[in-house]
Image (tube, grey):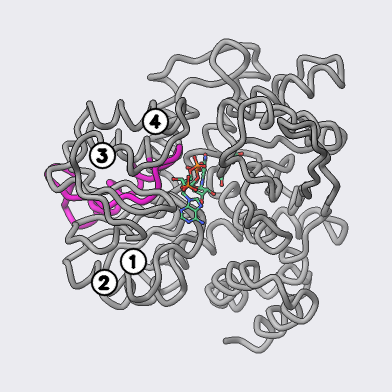
């Protein structure tokens, strides 16, 4: 690695030695930026690398709430406002027990480059809490969301910072948070959160957008090899928002979604998920909030307890659950099974060893910041509709989403070629996302 880039990386590790997931995300980006730093010396002169790895602002706070027994519980809340050079801070809230400062920083850093790739004017942020929604009833989740927004409201706003969902935050949670925001501020600040419901400021297709977008991106990669989804077997991990709509789009494109999973294990469907099974999963996960093993039990399907979706012979893999869920060994199994393309629906689901294995084997590999950008891009379209006080049809939003994904693919593909590594979507996406943010920071001077 270039000495300058290495020194930036070493310094961030030294400052926060425990933030391992953040180190991983930062290194994955920094090591691919070398050709851009060499070509454009102004970035080094303006200390852009030192600046982009450091968040503009970190907010951490106490979230007290009462459980069903009236007992007081305390969680930690966060908002990392990473970079606002190209637009207001934008990015989701995650509610999961593994949330800590390092995880929030990794996600905020990724979000900054991802949002730049969408072509829309959005800076990068992430937030959330170590609150675990599993096993909590609706009232407990509602109490938590109200308490969370009681502090968060002062840090967000349509021109400041616009949060949305992520793991553990979907339509239900955004509804509770939006109510708290309205009551505290006495404003229908409809641009302040995205992922709202239809009829109160939400955009059609926002729920579908991340899963659809990751599938559109995979379709574009396949096209470069004159290939298509029809008849392909696809391994999908997770069974939450992103996975659900990746499955649906695969079915629409004539492919077979052969797995879904959750943290308990994997359901295998050799002939592909059927519409009846998908409908059952949607109710199970979004209404009953049950476990994916119920799907296997109901339809007499194979359930691998503790197993991952990467055990099976497939053409395409779409990791849509969480970070580091697909490691070097998993990648090797997929390669041995003949996998042709990997499109990340989750953020950083593939470990560095996994990424290297795919790239060495010539597998088309799309990094999450490019392939899962359809979610935040459609959040941007929700903001545009809110600002206009208008609503667009599902067809119109889907068409715009599709156009954005085609554009991100083209940009990552062309940038990789331009910087001497054709086919390297990781390098292409990192450099393309970086250049826009870096140029904005140079133009705005040292304060940016
Ligand atoms: P959901 O909460 O809807 O679903 C998450 C799914 O992943 C569940 O099936 C969950 O299983 C599984 N999962 C979560 N954590 C773990 C873990 N530690 N080990 C194994 N399985 C796990 O979240 P989303 O679908 O919204 O998010 C999935 C991924 O996509 C995340 O990486 C997120 O950052 C990313 N993403 C989301 C976007 C969005 O618009 N929602 C946009 C772009 C990226 P279980 O229920 O057992 O925990
Ligand atoms: O990781 C992501 O891009 C998201 N969770 C979506 C963020 C958003 O603001 O829609």
Please state which of residues 403 and 294 is positioned toward the viewer in this rendering: 294
> Is residue 125 visible from the viewing direction of this image?
no
Q: Which residue is mark 1?
A: 423
Instruction: Please provide percent x and percent y for residue 273.
Output: 21, 38
Q: Is residue 8 magenta?
A: no
Separation of disc 4 and disc 3 at Cα?
Answer: 12 Å
Q: Marks 2 and 3: in contact by CB < 8 Å?
A: no
Q: Earlier in the sequence, mark 2 or mark 1?
A: 2
Q: Earlier in the sequence, mark 4 or mark 1?
A: 4
Q: Which residue is mark 3?
A: 297
Residue visible at 24% across and 53% down in the picture: 222
Residue visible at 73% across and 60% down in the picture: 101
The answer to whether residue 426 is above or below residue 13 is above
Between label 2 and label 1, give the one nearer the viewer: 2
Between label 4 and label 1, give the one nearer the viewer: 4
Q: Which residue is mark 4?
A: 284
Q: Which residue is mark 2?
A: 362
Q: Marks 1 and 2: in contact by CB < 8 Å?
A: yes
The answer to whether residue 189 is above or below residue 419 is above
**Magenta part of the chain:** 214-243
Q: Earlier in the sequence, mark 4 or mark 3?
A: 4
Q: Residue furthest front?
A: 69
């Amino acid at each position: 690695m270039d000495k300058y880039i290495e020194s930036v990386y070493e310094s961030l590790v030294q400052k926060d030695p425990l933030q391992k997931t953040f180190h991983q995300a930062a290194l994955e980006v920094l090591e691919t930026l070398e050709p851009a730093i060499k070509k454009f010396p102004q970035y080094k002169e303006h200390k852009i690398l030192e600046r982009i790895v450091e968040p503009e602002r970190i907010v951490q706070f106490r979230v007290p709430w009462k459980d069903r027994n009236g007992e007081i519980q305390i969680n930690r809340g966060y908002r990392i406002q990473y970079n606002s050079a190209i637009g207001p801070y934008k990015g989701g809230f995650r509610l999961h027990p593994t949330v800590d400062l390092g995880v929030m920083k990794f996600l905020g850093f990724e979000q900054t480059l991802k949002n730049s790739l969408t072509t829309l004017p959005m800076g990068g942020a992430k937030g959330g809490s170590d609150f675990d929604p599993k096993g909590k009833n609706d009232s407990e989740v509602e109490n938590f969301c109200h308490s969370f927004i009681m502090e968060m409201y002062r840090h967000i706003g349509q021109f400041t910072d616009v949060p949305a969902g992520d793991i553990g935050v979907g339509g239900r949670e955004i509804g509770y948070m939006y109510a708290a925001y309205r009551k505290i501020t006495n404003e229908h600040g409809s641009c302040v959160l995205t992922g709202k419901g239809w009829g109160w400021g939400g955009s059609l297709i926002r729920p579908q957008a991340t899963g659809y977008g990751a599938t559109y991106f995979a379709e574009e990669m396949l096209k470069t090899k004159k290939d298509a989804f029809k008849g392909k077997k696809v391994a999908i991990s997770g069974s939450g928002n992103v996975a659900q709509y990746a499955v649906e789009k695969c079915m629409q494109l004539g492919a077979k979604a052969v797995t879904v999973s959750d943290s308990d294990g994997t359901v295998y469907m050799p002939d592909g998920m059927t519409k009846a099974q998908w409908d059952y999963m949607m109710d199970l996960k979004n209404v009953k909030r049950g476990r994916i093993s119920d799907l296997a039990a109901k339809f007499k399907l194979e359930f691998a307890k503790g197993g991952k979706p990467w055990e099976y012979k497939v053409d395409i893999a779409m990791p849509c659950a969480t970070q580091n869920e697909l490691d070097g060994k998993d990648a090797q199994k997929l390669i041995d099974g003949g996998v042709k393309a990997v499109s990340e629906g989750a953020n950083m689901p593939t470990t560095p060893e996994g990424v290297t294995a795919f790239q060495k084997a010539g597998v088309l590999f799309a990094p999450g910041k490019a392939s899962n950008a359809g979610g935040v891009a459609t959040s941007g379209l929700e903001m545009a509709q809110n600002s206009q006080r208008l609503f667009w049809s599902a067809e119109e939003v889907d068409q715009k989403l599709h156009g954005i994904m085609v554009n991100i693919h083209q940009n990552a593909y062309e940038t990789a070629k331009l910087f001497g590594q054709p086919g390297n979507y990781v390098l292409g996406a990192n450099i393309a996302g970086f250049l826009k943010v870096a140029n904005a920071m140079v133009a705005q001077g040292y304060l940016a």
